[in-house]
Structure formats: C-alpha cells, structure tokens
Amino acid sequence: MKKNKLLTCNKCNWVHFGVSLEDALKQSAEFNRYWMTLSLEDRESYYGGSANDFTRYTKCMVCKNDFTDFRDAKDGDVPEGSTINPILFLG
C-alpha cells in the first residue's frame, strides 16, 4: 500500500494527505458515479445536493487555503488517530 505524503496547511496548521491530480480526478469521478445512484433526498441530506468537483482537492478542508501554501508535515503536527483529508500534491 502506497503511503501518502502528509502536508500541513501554513494558514491553520490542519494536516492533510497529498494526492496526485490523477487520483483527485479519479476519486471525484468514482464518487459522482455513486452520487448519481442516490435519490434527490439522499443527495441533499448527505452531500448538500452537489456532486464532487476535483477542485475540492485544491483547498484546505478547514480554512480554504490554497494547496500551494502547504509544507511537509512534521512530527507532532497531527495526533495519532486524527482524521485527515486529501489535498492536491504535485510534488
């Protein structure tokens, strides 16, 4: 299993895991195929009524900082067991 690079937002210090553009596009397409199988009510209830757009991978989940303003995560940036989210990583 490939280990993703951990990246820390320079604005709010939230840690994300880096994903390639290819993976972001693939995951968005896979989610959207699933999303289309849901009822309108479930789409609204669980996902706010909108499909996924890969550009969601370009902003910090917490503060919406751009993916270009992240640094490599350091020991102690994220406590063990914390939930982290994907962010575009082109490196």
Image (tube, grey):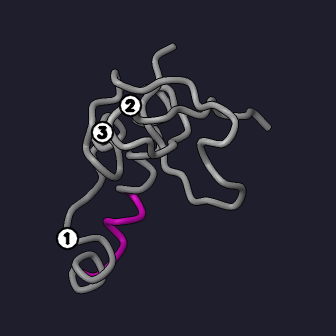
> Which secondary structure lies at badge 2?
loop
Q: Horizontally, is 14 left or right of 38 in the view?
A: right
Could you tell me how far apart the alpha carbons at marks 3 and 1 are, in whole angstroms?
Answer: 20 Å
Q: Nearer the viewer, residue 77 or 85?
A: 77
Q: Amino acid at mark 2?
A: Asn
The residue that label 1 is drawn on is 49
The residue that label 2 is drawn on is 10
> Which secondary structure lies at badge 1?
loop
Task: Answer above or below: position of 30 versus 37.
Answer: above
Choose the circle earlier in sequence order: 3 or 1.
1
Task: Answer above or below: position of 90 versus 51.
Answer: above
Q: Residue drawn at (26%, 58%), measured in percent from left and top?
A: 51
Furthest toward the top, the residue is: 91
Q: Horizontally, is 36 left or right of 85 in the view?
A: left
Q: Amino acid at mark 3?
A: Lys
- Which region shows up in magenta? 33-39
Task: Answer above or below: position of 35 versus 5.
Answer: below
Badge 3 local density, few (<14 within 10 Å), some, or many (20+)?
some
Say whether marks 3 and 2 touch (CB < 8 Å): no
